[in-house]
Image (tube, rainbow, N blue to C red):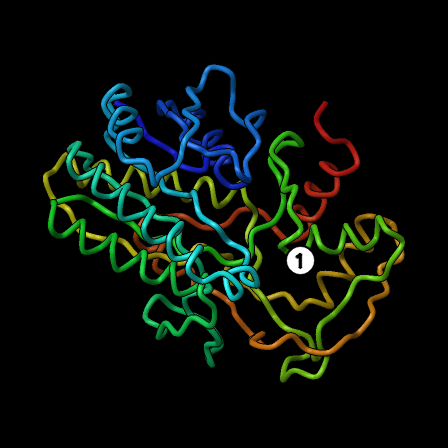
Amino acid sequence: MTWLITGGAGYIGSHVIASMREAGERVVVVDDLSGGDPARVPEDVPLERGTVLDRPFLDRVLREHAVHGIVHLAAKKAVGESVERPLFYYHENVTGLQVLLAAAADAGVRSFVFSSSASVYGTPDVDLVTEETPCRPLSPYGETKLAGEWLVRATGRAHGMSTACLRYFNVAGAAAPALADTGVFNLVPMVFERLAAGLPPRIFGDDYATPDGTCVRDYIHVADIADAHLAVARRLDERARAGSGGDLTLNIGSGEGVSVREMIDLIGEVTGLDATPEIVDRRPGDPANVVASAERIAAELGWKARHDVRSMIASAWESRVHPAE
């Protein structure tokens, strides 16, 4: 019995592979390598290069590898690009998910874990975001994640599939240099990129209604994200074996808020570099405060984040200074 991990050659996907394999799970990877690196996938893990939009390809992979569960991570995720190319994002993220779910249902797959995002909440006006907080996404990317959740749950109900929708907050860190985040979409790598270029990191607005005027976010170590996937996958397995479907919708966050200024100051401490920031205009749509309530996943699975913000920054910096050969 095998777990299929779509997008397994990506930053988060490669960490999920490592966590699941360490726990003794068998995995196979599907990735079109448009954003992933095959070097992240261990040599003894099958890597099937292809897209979730290709139904015959998926049918073959599911059959040949006797897949019983899927962790779906593959998606386009640049918010700005999604505004410029909404049709592309809906095609890749929603149509691709629909094709994958149809193949999974026909193949008798019993468990499906969907990588969602805190972007489904939009700009919540609450201190802690719970899974019951109304979803009002601000971008086509966030809309595709919310639509994906609807599609996953509906398919699970119709086909007796155990499903989970995991809403990630701000991911950072690395479990090993070879698995580091090489993109520049998140705060930590963005600050590293500015420092490496001899430029000050930028803060987009310092006049928010927060203690230091900068936006407050919930940061979660990618290794914790991976361990959460393992815990969820095992719970879905239990439900599938018991013949009970159902859906889990869970925030994956630390439950603690850190401001952008605090993050940049800590990056300066960890790296030893001058990280004095440059204050620029606000970005449209940035909420002042988005911090997860992590109570539901703790109650449901006994899971909680183990890594603090300093360890996230230190591991990411170590991976940049001493990248994998």
The total number of labels drawn is: 1
Q: Is residue 268 above or below residue 18?
A: below
Q: Is residue 277 above or below residue 243?
A: below
Q: Quadrant of residue 261?
A: bottom right
Residue identifier under label 1 = 187
Q: Is residue 132 above or below residue 12?
A: below
Q: Quadrant of the C terminus?
A: top right
Asked whether, in this view, residue 219 is left or right of residue 141, the answer is: right
**Percent position of residue 243, x then y:** 10, 39
Bin the neighbour count of mark 1 within 10 Å (Cα to Cα): few under 14, some 14-19, many 20 and up.
some
Asked whether, in this view, residue 243 is left or right of residue 172, the answer is: left
**Percent position of residue 178, x then y:** 64, 29
**Residue at image coords 24%, 43%:** 101
**Residue at image coords 30%, 36%:** 70
**Residue at image coords 18%, 49%:** 156
Q: Amino acid at mark 1?
A: Leu
Asked whether, in this view, residue 196 is left or right of residue 88, the answer is: right
Asked whether, in this view, residue 2 is left or right of residue 180, the answer is: left
Q: Quadrant of residue 162?
A: top left
**Residue at image coords 84%, 48%:** 196
**Percent position of residue 188, x then y:** 69, 53
**Percent position of residue 42, x then y:** 52, 21
- Of residues 91 and 253, the one nearer the viewer is 91
Q: Secondary structure at mark 1?
A: helix
- Of residues 98 and 299, the one nearer the viewer is 98
Q: Quadrant of the N terminus?
A: top left
